[in-house]
Amino acid sequence: MEDSKLALLFTGFLLPVLVASVGINYGQIANNLPSPEHVVPLVKAIGATRVKLYDADPKVLKAFANTGVEFIVGLGNEYLSKMTDPANAQAWVKANVQCYLPATKITSIAVGNEVLTFNDTSLSGCLLPAMQSVHTALVNLKLDSQVTVTTAHSVAILQSSYPPSTGAFRQDLKGCIAPILDFLSKTCSPFLINAYPFFAYKADPKQVSLDFVLFQPNAGIVDPGTKLHYDNMLFAQIDAVYAALSSLGYKKLPVQISETGWPSKGDEDEIGASPENAKKYNGNLLKLINQKKGTPARPNSDLNIFVFAMFNENMKPGPTSERNYGLFKPDGTPSYGLGFSGIAVSSGNSTSTGSGSSSSSSSSGTNGPSIYLSPPANSSSGYLAISSSTERFVWSTWAMLGMGFMSMAAY
């Protein structure tokens, strides 16, 4: 399918960089998304400097060459068994990473996604060997100094998360987690965690404070162990992860939030999924990141956060919310207002497959979209959201109990 030429309409003369270190998850489980060439100006327009993929889509990696945008490429769970063979891992790295460097700044490979909480021992048993094989391939190709190897976890790997200072990993997973942490530490790679306060509110809206999960003004909570004050759930969850890492001897291991966000639409039973709440969650989160402050327990640590996702993805399975975490609608218009310049994209889209990798064809006879600037308009449609991975079966929910919270996990 040929792409007709896109026209971007910016509703302001200036395109403010909201957050210098913000990252964006670029999922493609849809059949109506713009071609990657037309996504480049959208990423730049919101000030994103990092993009996380769930595959190593060649069209995306080529489109972003020489843009300066950093990439985390993904190696899906379905490839883990094959990647335990060093020869297969090296072939994959050559074909999906090495050939795009240095033009495209690939800085990390995420091997698998939320593997340990799938409760599949055959899959989890392949995770570390696959990570090791991929790292060995990078060493052999002399790329290990510029590309790290890691994996993203669900926050449901935690046994407890309240109070944050008592954060601990699930007892049944420690045997898998400990050697992974040792690998990350030795290879100077970050620990990735997917955290969604939305699921906590959805599970118990009568007990969980909406203001607490949306970064709105509220009384907050005090960790009785550290006396630190928390006024939002995400930071409490992050510090619970730091506490869990410290309990196993990995206090200095850096943590990155590989996914977080709020849906703008959901099913009838998905309480809280709305454009208004998504705007508050993501808008307030970006403001906090822009203040360059860390969490209460790690005030000097950078908040490395990837927002999910660039687009609403119409072919994602599951509840309605899964298809409505996008920053943008498929036509490129913002899903709701977040304060950055609104963007409207005219006709012209491409097809992607439900596998998560783009099958869009490049634009015909164009060198990318034409950009026109217009005077500021009173628009309330611009939005940022981050979704979970395609198949999420686990999440962490917190229920308010008087002055505290109880951490629970649904499997």
Image (spheres, rainbow, N blue to C red):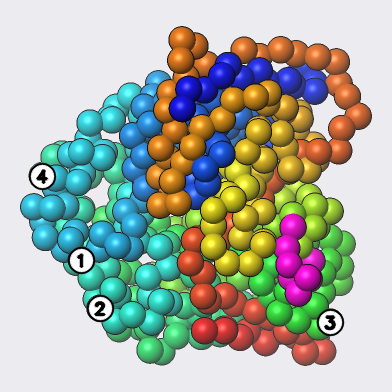
C-alpha separation, residue under disc 4 versus residue under disc 2: 27 Å
C-alpha separation, residue under disc 1 versus residue under disc 3: 43 Å
Secondary element under disc 2, as helix, strand or loop, is helix
> Which residue is more in the foreground, 308 or 316?
316
Q: Which residues are magenta?
A: 265-272
Amino acid type, residue under disc 3 in the picture: Lys
On the image, which quarter does residue 264 sit in? bottom right
Q: Vertically, is 326 above or below 38? A: below
Which residue lies under the disc numbered 3? 206
Which residue lies under the disc numbered 1? 81
289 relative position to 280: left or right: left
Secondary element under disc 1, as helix, strand or loop, is helix
Of circles 1 and 3, which is in front? Answer: 1
Amino acid type, residue under disc 4 in the picture: Asn
Secondary element under disc 3, as helix, strand or loop, is loop
Q: Name the residue rendered at 28%, 30% in the picture.
A: 100
Of circles 4 and 2, which is in front? Answer: 2
Marks 2,1: beta carbons within 8 A: yes
Q: Name the residue rendered at 81%, 38% in the picture.
A: 381
Q: Vertically, is 377 above or below 235? A: above
Of circles 4 and 3, which is in front? Answer: 3
Mark closer to the chain start, 4 or 3: 4
